[in-house]
Amino acid sequence: MLDYPLHVFLAVLAAAALHATWNALVRGGSDPLLHTAAVVGWTGVFALPTLFFLPLPTPQAALVLVGSVIIHIAYYTTLAGAYRNGNLSTIYPIIRGCAPIMISLGSLVFLDETLNLTNWLGVLLISAGVLVIALRSGLENVARALKWALACSLTIAIYSIIDGYGARISGNALSFAAWLFVSESIAFWALLTALGRGKALRNYVRDRFRNTALAGIMSATGYTVVLWAMSQAPLALVSATRETSVLFAGVLGAILLKEKVRARQIVAASIILCGLIAMRL
């Protein structure tokens, strides 16, 4: 069983903060699929120059990259479907809360990664804390979009396991991340162009140039850290720690957007913090 060193844990917390920050930058976008594609496109732009200084992926890692790109696009598709069938405040916590449990089970089956009792407790508490946030909109909205949310959670679990495995076998997590960003951005933009949304996507980037570019930098940096962490520690613990981004999102909302902090959010934050403590025991 891999350890979860403190410096890796802290790095993933920083990545979670970046994730919450870039999501706050693009909050309120009129089309979730377009703003996701815009950010993904920028990650490819920023990663492209680094390819000249990084090694080529091995044949095995290249195959993993192909699978990763496919499942990432499936994630974006199911995410857009989830948002079409429910509101973000309900859907997003369900998606992110279920994923760590699926990753824990998947990494056990496919990568033979085992967790001790306190690790499992930590993962379950973090997932429970994130799911508490979904209660804000009532069970009717949850039921309506549950199938899309669970499908999206499943794609997160699959790409997390694939990416974690790829980062390990590549021997260079930074190289794997850079090739993933470039390949994914090309494939995603090509798909939207083929579907007749290329002009809308270009206009979206033009109108939100600064925010999407900054979000792209943060997204690329944060996920590179996560991939590196997955090469150093159990996937389940890294993914669960990453979901603390909802805590940082709440703090940003309260400080920057003057959003009201509700009792439910305090309860959720307390449960998540207990989960983090359990993982460090």
Image: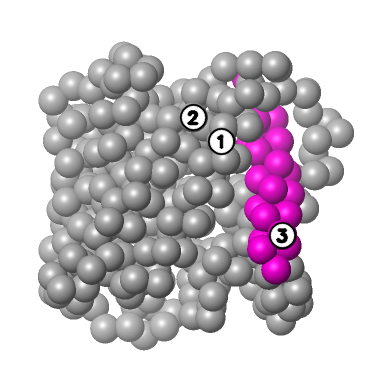
Rounded to the nearest whole Å, what is the CA distance between mark 2 and mark 1? 6 Å
State the residue in front, 235 or 66. 66
- Which is in the foreground here, disc 3 or disc 2? 3
In the rendering, at what x and y percent does residue 123 appear?
A: 22, 39
Tell me what residue is drawn at x 36 percent, y 85 percent. 258
Q: Which mark is residue 162?
A: 2
Tell me what residue is drawn at x 70 percent, y 17 percent. 58
In the rendering, at what x and y percent does residue 62 appear?
A: 67, 24
* Relative to 222, 269 lies left or right: left
Q: Identify the magenta region.
A: 170-196
Rounded to the nearest whole Å, what is the CA distance between mark 1 and mark 3? 20 Å
Tell me the quadrant of the picture where the N terminus can be found. top left
In the rendering, at what x and y percent does residue 207 appear?
A: 71, 81
* Relative to 38, 4 lies left or right: left
First in sequence: mark 3 vs mark 2:
2
* Residue type of the residue flagged with mark 2: Ile
* Residue type of the residue flagged with mark 1: Ser
Tell me what residue is drawn at x 77 percent, y 23 percent. 56
Q: How crowded is mark 2: few (under 14 residues within 10 Å), some or many (20 or more)?
A: some
Q: Which mark is residue 194?
A: 3
* Residue type of the residue flagged with mark 3: Ala
Residue 113 in view of the camera: no
The residue singled out by tag 1 in the image is 68
Colour scheme of the rendered structure: one colour
Magenta residue check for 138: no
Q: In this view, does 152 lie above or below 81?
A: above
Rounded to the nearest whole Å, what is the CA distance between mark 3 and mark 2? 26 Å
Q: Residue furthest front?
A: 195
Magenta residue check for 178: yes
Is there CB contact under 8 Å for labels 2 and 1? Answer: yes
Tell me the quadrant of the picture where the C terminus can be found. top left
